[in-house]
Every structure is written in structure tokens, then in C-alpha cells.
Image: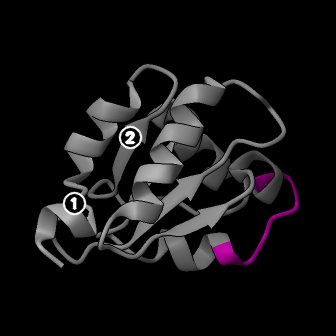
Amino acid sequence: MSGDKRLLYCHCAYAKVVPARVKHELLEQLGDSDGDFEAVPDLCEMSARKDPALADYAGDPELRIVACYPRSVRWLFHAAGHELPQEVELHNMRESSAAELSQALGLMTDRESGA
């Protein structure tokens, strides 16, 4: 994966607004890549519960989030009492294909890296 930026993947398990094919293909590509990532079941649910983990994520200006609409993700953090820094990269699974997201994230599998 390009850079050492922390990557957060939202599986959008409850709202079901992200195409299932995109979620599953990207999650498989993330798992096959040589980079680390964190997966959460649903940022909407975390926001509703005011999950303390959101404060940790919001405190990382180099964070990359793969979820739904960027405006919605920012609002979810705000609703939970945490503002995302403007530098946070937000990638939209509702409007991008898994291949587009994989390229934007710089995913590289072990096979591609020669491992």
C-alpha cells in the first residue's frame, strides 16, 4: 500500500447503501495486499453509539477512510463529537468501483510485490 498512512475500511454492515460487490471485492483486495488496514462493521453505528474509537481515528490527520459519501463520513464523526481534520483522505465506495478504489489506495498484493 502506498505510504504508511493508516487505513480505515467501513463495511457499512447496517445501512446497506454501498454496493455489496464493491465492498466485498475491495475487502478481498485489502486482505491480499501487503499493507495494514483496520476494518469496522459500520461507522454509522459507531457514531450513534459515540464509540470512543472515533476520537482516535479523528486524531490522525494522515488517516484514509474508505466508506460512503465524504460529507456523510465527516458528519458521522461530527455527530459523535469529533471533527475529522481536512487532511483526512475520504474514498467513496458508493460511487467508485473496487478497481478504482484499489488504484487510488495504491494497493499491491504480495504477488505484485514479488514476495
Dot 1 crowding, Cα within 10 Å, few <14, some 14–19, many 20+: some
* Residue at image mark 1: 108
Instruction: Residue 52: say if magenta.
Output: yes
The colour scheme used to paint the residues is: one colour
Residue extent of the magenta highlight: 47-53
Q: Position of residue 21 (x, y in %)?
A: 58, 27
Which image quarter: residue 99? top left
Q: Position of residue 44 (x, y in %)?
A: 75, 46
* Amino acid type of the residue tagged 1 in the rendering: Met
Q: Which residue of the protein is positioned furthest toward the right in this rendering?
A: 49
Closer to us: 9 or 112: 112
Which image quarter: residue 40? bottom right
Q: Secondary structure at mark 2?
A: strand
Closer to us: 79 or 107: 107
* Residue at image mark 2: 91
Lower sequence index among marks 2 and 1: 2
